[in-house]
Image (cartoon, rainbow, N blue to C red):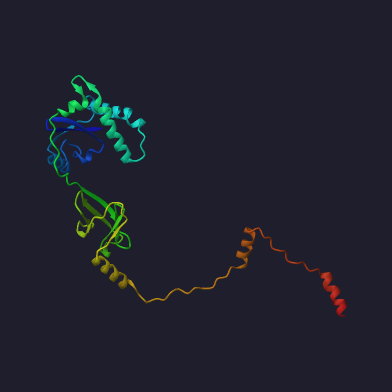
Amino acid sequence: MHRVLVALGGTPRVWRTDRMATIVISGSDRLTVDAAQAAKHYGVDIAVCPARRAQRKGVVEAAIKYTTRSWWRTARVATPAEAQASLDRWCIDIADERQRPAGTVAEIAATEPLRTLPHAAYPAQIAVQRRASRCALVAFEANHYSVPPAQAGRTVTILARVGEPLLRILSTADEVVATHHRAPAGAGQTVRTSEHAAMLERAVLAAFTTDHGCRRKTNRPPGDAALAELARLNGIESAPAPVISLQRYAELAEVAS
């Protein structure tokens, strides 16, 4: 388990993460490009704590244990929104009111020299891979966006930057094949450009052919074996074939003579 030590305006903060590959380059103590850009945007310094250093990470574990025992185990929440609201109330009513020699936690925090956050959020970019359907549509955030018919059945990459109204769709060759206005998440909308609609119509008409006719619908009634099996499954016993006695044939022969 690794930790990241973040200094905000001279006051250190410990950031716990289980996915260090998104912060630190594997096998080194160097930050990834995305992590370095985010730190520069917010004006913070990031120092990577080495692995297997329990003395430097005990403060993180203690904070997690306190939060778990004091709030999470008894919190009555059913959704993430309720959990966030409950945590906010707990922080104000309980955690911030803890007494320390210099005052409460909230009073000490108010005197810390923290920098103000930037007005604009960091422009993080969401990148997901999706397979285009046969109708040349890709799904993203419960909406569907069109791509050229040539991308149907192929895997594409959707890029959406946080806070921007547009999203881009890239092919496997990193070529931009579509750009759409981003629909609200969960709206269930289908966004298809007129160009893609015309291309899809032409592709469907081009694939239409009259070279072969429809298959004939042959008549295939059930045979005796199938009818016998159906009767057995339905519990219907078929009547045995009548047995004709040879004595009856002899009687008929005498009458005829």
Residue 190 or 19: which is nearer the viewer?
190
Residue 41 or 2: which is nearer the viewer?
41
Give how far across and how far down residue 69 sits, in percent.
Answer: 33, 27
Answer with left or right where residue 95 lies relative to residue 239.
left
Residue 183 or 58: which is nearer the viewer?
183
Give how far across and how far down residue 239 sits, in percent.
Answer: 71, 64
Against 119, residue 205 (above or below) is: below
Instruction: Identify the residue shown where x is 26% and y is 36%.
Output: 18
Against 99, residue 215 (above or below) is: below
Quadrant in the picture for the N terminus: top left
- Residue at the top extreme of this rendering: 101
Residue 90 picture quarter: top left
Give how far across and how far down residue 127 sits, in percent.
Answer: 23, 50
Residue 156 or 168: which is nearer the viewer?
168
Quadrant in the picture for the C terminus: bottom right
Against 79, residue 246 (above or below) is: below
Answer with left or right where residue 21 lies relative to residue 80.
left
Instruction: Identify the residue shown where x is 86% and y is 79%.
Output: 256
- Residue at the bottom extreme of this rendering: 257
Residue 92 picture quarter: top left
